[in-house]
Amino acid sequence: MLNFALMGAGRIGKMHAKNLSMHSKSNLSYVYDINQDFANEVAKLSGAKVAQSAEEAINDKNVDAVFIASATPTHIDFMTMAAKAGKAVLCEKPIDLDIAKVDKCYETIKNFSVPIQIGFNRRFDKSNKKIKLAKDNGEIGNLEMVIITSRDPEPPGIEYLKAAGGFFRDTTIHDFDLSRFILGDDPVIEVSAYGSQLISAECKEVGDHDTAMFIMRSQKGVLIHINNSRRAVYGYDQRVEIFGSKGMMISNNQSPTSVEKFDKNMTYAKDPIHFFFIERYEQSYKDQLDDFVNIIMNNEKPSVTFEDGRNALLLANAAYESFETGKSTKVNY
Amino acid sequence: MLNFALMGAGRIGKMHAKNLSMHSKSNLSYVYDINQDFANEVAKLSGAKVAQSAEEAINDKNVDAVFIASATPTHIDFMTMAAKAGKAVLCEKPIDLDIAKVDKCYETIKNFSVPIQIGFNRRFDKSNKKIKLAKDNGEIGNLEMVIITSRDPEPPGIEYLKAAGGFFRDTTIHDFDLSRFILGDDPVIEVSAYGSQLISAECKEVGDHDTAMFIMRSQKGVLIHINNSRRAVYGYDQRVEIFGSKGMMISNNQSPTSVEKFDKNMTYAKDPIHFFFIERYEQSYKDQLDDFVNIIMNNEKPSVTFEDGRNALLLANAAYESFETGKSTKVNY
Amino acid sequence: MLNFALMGAGRIGKMHAKNLSMHSKSNLSYVYDINQDFANEVAKLSGAKVAQSAEEAINDKNVDAVFIASATPTHIDFMTMAAKAGKAVLCEKPIDLDIAKVDKCYETIKNFSVPIQIGFNRRFDKSNKKIKLAKDNGEIGNLEMVIITSRDPEPPGIEYLKAAGGFFRDTTIHDFDLSRFILGDDPVIEVSAYGSQLISAECKEVGDHDTAMFIMRSQKGVLIHINNSRRAVYGYDQRVEIFGSKGMMISNNQSPTSVEKFDKNMTYAKDPIHFFFIERYEQSYKDQLDDFVNIIMNNEKPSVTFEDGRNALLLANAAYESFETGKSTKVNY
Amino acid sequence: MLNFALMGAGRIGKMHAKNLSMHSKSNLSYVYDINQDFANEVAKLSGAKVAQSAEEAINDKNVDAVFIASATPTHIDFMTMAAKAGKAVLCEKPIDLDIAKVDKCYETIKNFSVPIQIGFNRRFDKSNKKIKLAKDNGEIGNLEMVIITSRDPEPPGIEYLKAAGGFFRDTTIHDFDLSRFILGDDPVIEVSAYGSQLISAECKEVGDHDTAMFIMRSQKGVLIHINNSRRAVYGYDQRVEIFGSKGMMISNNQSPTSVEKFDKNMTYAKDPIHFFFIERYEQSYKDQLDDFVNIIMNNEKPSVTFEDGRNALLLANAAYESFETGKSTKVNY
């Protein structure tokens, strides 16, 4: 049984707490949140102890692993603290918004041989895994194009927007990582980015985008397209298409039921798709945890490395440079 | 070039006239209808001559073939007249509503070696043909079940109902034939029929059904289900499912466009399916004509024989017997 | 927290044990199985105590409820024992194969006011619930037809077949119940049944069917079709279609992923659907338990009553009578 | 009845000849092709006269309209000749590969008030028309994104590639036009283009692309993505997605049948989609002709103007500039 300390008890922290409680090989020992009410709520549901400080939880000798789901600016501090304490880390994306801080963090933590995994949960989605496997097995032949559609159901509030680090670093970063996951050892070398302000007055106010499109090129010449929106009224639109010399595979959207409706206006109509990431990726978060628990127990290498977290951020940065310069931008790893 | 005489210029007659005019190897020489206005309309569009009597058209020595699309009670007379005149016949279903008349007709026409084909157009539908071929090729293994869903968009008027010979003989007859088409040389030997009056006051008035279900058994033990309705508000519902030891194939519905709509209430919503048989089976009527023209030109055997028309009627009659007696009824061929 | 005693630790018992362990308001106190190894295995995973007899578990004063997932012939004994001990009961279908025993059981247990629920889990499936709700809300207008397709992935072994009580009582009983669930207060009054032996030599050996079709009529004239097979090579085929004056709704099949494949032979190809009931109805079993726990805690009426279990058996019996007599059979409630 | 002269009797010319012959209000009077065998073949099937020169056909006083389906370099000559002769023109895309020639042509023909329509047939596809109408009607709210997937089944031969003017001008030009069709009065102002050589040795030899992606921005900030390939093994992949504040609509692919197959490996598998443009856009070519005939007869304005042809070419040119400079390129109209 692995004892976890959970940093952060907000929306996503609560979900992780529940998964940690239900997993047969993990135990939630501590929860810490700057907002004590949030921590108390999670503690009550899970039986975990509320830590008065991050240090208390992370440094407790009975704690084996730290799950970091707190605000982005705290990620590096907690990760470093955990690494120094010899604890395994599963950290939500992004590592940080500032690549310089990420690099400095790396210099510190690389000296501690603890497994550090970044929470790109979409890699653990059964459908995404299936198409990744199909690509690796040659089922679609040589990969030629990747098309990722990723649209949130509704724009976040202005406080979130102010802290989030921009659409490309906060949202597209998942799609940058998913592109890298599919491409495997063929790195993305070039990015072009377009952004637009069409939906949200709050986005406009903070100078952020709510609509965006990207093209990327890999070293082997594979072309990748990503499109993002902060509002899809029909739910959390999550599609991945891989196209190659022998065919195509699509990881398509999912609905809560399999009901189809036929009336005088329309036929074969399904439910709205899942509302947002908590619903759509419910199982992937569980599978991510399961994977991480097994990695620790079997002394294996993390499935999603610190470097994966860093490289996704590099792509986001290159995308911002492209947007600002109007040029196709080379990615410097 | 084959010269056709067309009997009947109503809704379906007009469609056949158009197909006859556009086919590269057929020519519409005559049109005859008891309603002269109908005949005139077809003549104007197609360039055909309006015949003053069926005899005039059928017996004209330049006429090669007779297309019978007139009211059911006239079918046998016109067919017999054509057979005696040595003309090929393509006759709309049903041959007649009375099996005794059908048998008597057969005694007469069997002496004349003209090709006589019955208009079970659904056999020529590309999707139905594909599943029939798959069954024959063993693609689904041994056939175990057939499920046919066939629902009209809206009930007909009372005049039509009075003349139509009952739901099972007028509508289900297509599905009886389609079952026989799929089964091939494995005859249907037993039928159970349920009928209901749920939709149409006119149906009730004439003592007819508007909702019906059937089970049939073939000699080899294949089970067949048919369900019929006189009203499907989403269009002309036409599905055929074949199920066997290696899998299943479904000939599914078709829509005028391939558009899918997503909004806050529903996703992947398609158009209403085709409104009725003219739209849904447009191509099958053309392919049926093409098949018939080639049969005549190449002296081949008809694809759908007089006997096929007779046997579909026998199944309808057995279904009525089952409905009236509440028993599973054996079919006497 | 409700303490449960689980009777039966076979395939389905294990699944229930897992759900009981994970539910936040239930605790698995005891497990009993005639096969002690099975019981030990469940005990080890769940922390439950292995009971040496059914009595020991059921009569323990700390036990609040009994979950009966043992062999069918034991259901009535355990249910009666639990009722006498004042314990709530959730009992797998069928209550028994013999209607006389069911009726006698009822005479005994009706004197004890404990909640007794029958495990027709498909009523708790999200898609089935959605179409039931749509029917009740008038979303499809007046109900006219119900079509249920229910096919197992592969035939069971001969030992199972010998004890199962026949295809209609063991398998179709779920579909009889689902029909009743959808129809609500409009009772099924008439049944016709066809059975065939096409697939399994073992089925033939014990005189059972592997392929079956049914038509039923409700008091209001709604027609219901059910088709069953013991083998669908593409997985556990579970579809429910309701058709009415305003349209149609289909509870369609579900696959483990939402991947679609396109290659030179086929397009839009999905995975095989879920293999069998454990996978397809995973969530419904959890929701059934959750419903039952809430019923006990809130002193509510069971969602699926003893009478529901009895009536489904009556339909199976009427179906057998129809099969044997070749007649449409009236149902005597 | 309108008399047409057809320039060009190759693959697409033959299809147009057939449509001209079958249309109730058009007559194919002349066919001209530099390859006399091609012209003879069309003449034989359609009954048209083979012209010895373009002039003979275009200048015949009985000819009302000229259908230009010959090689691209001849388009401007024939169009100018027809305009001078006062004949209506329906000209296949592109007008020419050289924008300077296009502009010069315009200077000449603008003095002749004949209707000139460019053959962007996809505008006449029922599904594309439906989504365009939905956008105009506000059915999807404010337009925010357009995504066009357009992939040929297989690469053309090297002779075709040498003459075609490059992937963006020959193939993407249809997608540039379709983007403009959907956007309506909101012009595309900026383009970024990526091309790759992944498939065809012949493409590489002539320095052309076989894989390409584009992002464009409209004046109102709508983002448009196009992706193209010269090879999709599952058929001619033609999808258009429009996304807005109230939802999304997709004009999806179409197959020759509506059959779905289920076996142990996959479920809901459809046929390969239509092989290529002749099959996929069969009806749109007929509807384009019908539209053009009605325009001439009713003295209406062409549906797709010379300027539409010119503007699509401008977008292709801007795309090439973007590809060559690695910059997002402004479009100068």
Image (cartoon, coloured by chain):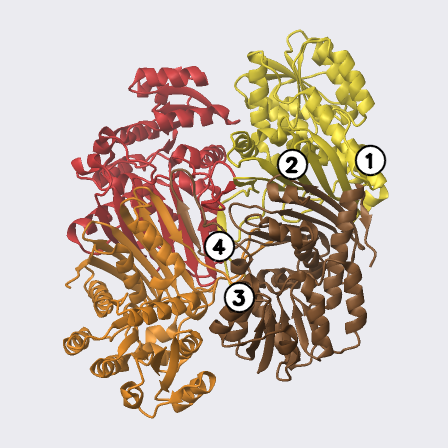
Chain colours: A brown, B red, C orange, D yellow
Determine the residue located farthest toward the top in the rendered image: D61
* Residue found at x 80% / y 66%: A104
As shown in the figure, which amino acid type bears the numbered disc 3?
Answer: Phe
Q: Give me the C-alpha separation between circle 2 and circle 4.
A: 28 Å
Give SS at disc 2.
loop
Q: Which mark is residue D222?
A: 2
Q: Chain of mark 3?
A: A
Task: Tell me, yes or no, whether dots 3 and 2 are on the same chain.
Answer: no
Residue D219: give x, y in percent of width and height: 68, 31
10 Å neighbourhood of mark 1: few (<14), some, or many (≥20)? some
Residue D38: give x, y in percent of width and height: 71, 26
Q: Which residue is mark 1?
A: D321
Q: Chain of mark 2?
A: D
Q: Give me the C-alpha separation between circle 1 and circle 4.
A: 43 Å
Image depth: mark 3 or mark 2 in front: 3
Q: Give me the C-alpha separation between circle 3 and circle 4.
A: 30 Å
10 Å neighbourhood of mark 2: few (<14), some, or many (≥20)? many
Q: Which residue is mark 3?
A: A38
Image depth: mark 3 or mark 4 in front: 3
Q: Which residue is mark 4?
A: A255
10 Å neighbourhood of mark 3: few (<14), some, or many (≥20)? some
As shown in the figure, which amino acid type bears the numbered disc 2?
Answer: Val
